[in-house]
């Protein structure tokens, strides 16, 4: 079977392969993510308790506080940041965080095609996400 | 994106690392969001001031910018900090105070104005149609929607980058076409007080994503209620502005209706506390205006804060000075008027505060995660009843 390639828009360049962590809900990095361990702490969030470290973090878009950019920067400095970020719609707060934290990022991707646990290759220079291996049910 | 020769020189590093880094952030944002060029800004407003939300790593980023002679080119105001030098500094561990001072020092080295408020428009109102680079999402929505100034919702670092370059890319809210409403919101709910407006914002923010709504029937709404709406709509969404006048009905627009039950549900969801007895009653998110200070003072007159309860009113130094009589009245009741501080970016959990009662939907949204507190969301009058006796 040919791997599924999703085409998006490059935002912060980089290339990596990792397991996907997928949310259907927007994320606020301030308040929604614990900068001490990279876990999502927002109650009622579908990823509450999950850790974003070394994952391809897929979510529709960011929301809330403009301090979120610095939270992403802190996570990167502690080695807790995601390997890459895939959004449906990039918002400036997440974009600036990804720029200063140097986290590869693409947007305009149909993230509902990706499932948590899938092995995904992100080429953020071309703006593509390739699903290499589906998580076995 | 078109860059002048001067801008290209900055991008190439000829004006030092700080200017180059800031220019890189602006150019990248501009290219992503279809900016055509950089435009001069009148003022910048920077978020990410409290040590609680900033943390250690970004302090080094700020220090590196200041060390490399990064200097703001326009008036640059700052968001609130995590403690005030009088009341909270004496109750919180010294290392937190030191870190907080370190952050303020870096911003001072870069030439910013230590306004320490989330309502910089109470300090100096921007002109209608002026271009700004503001972070602090509540102020962004208020500036665009109520004051008629033009700003994107900047991330903390991009507002600082714009301040240091003195310009911002002309995308998003800096273009008239993007400020047109694309969705009509009919309000069938009865909005009785500032808390209802906050709850409306929480509800709408989730539905709107980045659409610009025209909200019907807000013409007679007070500025302070619109401030609550602005703060809340940005909390749950990406919204940058709303229209609150009569809406042009020329084109066919998507329509949604907000009913009473939507607003009540938002308030219920933001009231997590099992008991109705708060440890802290808090007014001032966003920071109180002079009008709000007067309302609080009037309700506090002749009363005393209940034993075992803290009562805080947060505002800017500027408003605190302008409302001296109100401050005395509130302090006489045993309340604390904290200037330059924001409760959710302070360390209330270190003071043993487990339940916060507030009239602010934004605070009620953030407090469970940022302050590890249960919340009670009620209008100002109810909050003061809970805080005071006599």
Image (spheres, coloured by chain):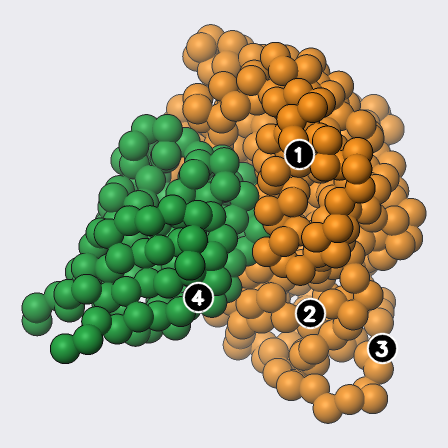
The answer to whether one can see residue A75 in this image is: yes
Rounded to the nearest angstrom, the CA distance separating label 1 from label 3 is 44 Å
**SS of the residue under disc 4:** loop
Name the front one of labels 3 and 4: 4
What percent of the width, then of the height, locates residue B99?
A: 50, 14
Chain B, which colour? orange
Q: Earlier in the sequence, mark 3 or mark 2?
A: 2
Which residue corresponds to mark 2? B212
Name the front one of labels 2 and 1: 1
Rounded to the nearest angstrom, the CA distance separating label 2 from label 4 is 24 Å
Which chain does the green colour mark? A
What percent of the width, then of the height, locates residue B140?
A: 71, 50
Mark 1, other Cα within 10 Å: few <14 / some 14–19 / many ≥20: many
Rounded to the nearest angstrom, the CA distance separating label 1 from label 4 is 27 Å
Which residue corresponds to mark 1? B11
Rounded to the nearest angstrom, the CA distance separating label 2 from label 1 is 33 Å
Q: Both on one chain, marks 2 and 1?
A: yes
Left or right for B291, reference B60: right
Which residue corresponds to mark 4? A8
The chain identifier of the residue carrying mark 3 reads B
Q: Both on one chain, marks 3 and 4?
A: no
Mark 4, other Cα within 10 Å: few <14 / some 14–19 / many ≥20: many
The chain identifier of the residue carrying mark 2 reads B
Query: Which labelled disc corresponds to residue B246?
Result: 3
Left or right for B199, reference A136: right
Residue drawn at 57 percent across, 22 percent down: B62
**SS of the residue under disc 2:** loop
Say above or below: B89 vs B258: above
What percent of the width, then of the height, locates residue B26?
A: 65, 42
């Amino acid at each position: 079977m040919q791997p599924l390639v999703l085409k998006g828009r490059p935002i912060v360049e980089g290339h990596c392969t990792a397991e996907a962590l997928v949310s259907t809900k927007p994320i606020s990095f301030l308040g929604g993510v614990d900068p001490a361990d990279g876990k999502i702490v927002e109650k009622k969030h579908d990823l509450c308790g999950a850790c974003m470290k070394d994952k391809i973090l897929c979510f529709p878009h960011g929301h809330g506080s403009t301090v979120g950019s610095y939270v992403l920067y802190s996570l990167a400095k502690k080695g807790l940041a995601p390997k890459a970020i895939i959004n449906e719609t990039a918002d400036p707060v997440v974009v600036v965080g990804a720029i200063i934290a140097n986290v590869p990022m693409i947007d305009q991707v149909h993230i509902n095609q990706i499932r948590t646990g899938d092995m995904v290759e992100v080429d953020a220079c071309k703006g593509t996400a390739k699903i290499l291996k589906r998580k076995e049910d | 994106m078109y860059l002048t020769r001067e801008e290209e020189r900055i991008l190439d590093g000829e004006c030092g690392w700080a200017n180059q880094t800031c220019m890189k952030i602006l150019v990248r944002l501009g290219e992503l969001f279809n900016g055509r060029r950089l435009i001069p800004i009148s003022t910048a407003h920077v978020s990410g001031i409290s040590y609680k939300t900033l943390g250690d790593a970004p302090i080094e980023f700020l220090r590196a910018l200041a060390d490399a002679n990064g200097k703001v080119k326009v008036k640059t105001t700052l968001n609130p900090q995590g403690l005030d030098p009088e009341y909270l500094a004496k109750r919180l561990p010294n290392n937190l105070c030191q870190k907080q001072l370190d952050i303020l020092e870096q911003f001072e080295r870069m030439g910013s104005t230590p306004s320490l408020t989330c309502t910089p428009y109470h300090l100096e109102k921007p002109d209608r149609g002026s271009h700004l680079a503001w972070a602090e999402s509540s102020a962004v929505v208020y500036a665009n929607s109520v004051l008629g100034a033009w700003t994107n919702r900047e991330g903390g670092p991009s507002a600082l980058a714009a301040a240091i370059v003195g310009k911002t890319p002309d995308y998003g809210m800096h273009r008239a076409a993007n400020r047109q409403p694309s969705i009509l919101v009919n309000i069938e709910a009865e909005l009785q007080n500032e808390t209802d407006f906050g709850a409306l914002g929480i509800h709408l923010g989730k539905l709107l994503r980045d659409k610009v709504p025209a909200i019907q029937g807000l013409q007679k709404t007070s500025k302070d209620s619109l401030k609550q709406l602005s703060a809340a709509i940005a909390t749950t969404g990406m919204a940058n502005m709303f229209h609150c006048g009569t809406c042009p009905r020329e084109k066919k627009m998507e329509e949604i209706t907000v009913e009473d039950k939507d607003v009540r549900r938002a308030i219920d969801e933001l009231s997590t506390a099992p008991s109705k007895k708060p440890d802290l009653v808090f007014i001032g998110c966003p920071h109180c205006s002079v009008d709000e200070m007067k309302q609080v003072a009037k309700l506090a007159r002749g009363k005393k804060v209940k034993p075992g309860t803290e009562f805080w009113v947060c505002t800017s130094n500027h408003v605190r000075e302008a409302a001296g009589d109100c401050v005395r009245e509130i302090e006489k009741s045993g309340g604390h008027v904290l200037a330059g501080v924001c409760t959710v970016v302070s360390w209330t959990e270190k003071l043993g505060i487990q339940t916060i009662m507030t009239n602010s939907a934004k605070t009620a949204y953030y407090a469970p995660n940022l302050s590890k507190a249960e919340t009670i969301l009620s209008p100002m009058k109810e909050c003061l009843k809970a805080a005071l006796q006599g």
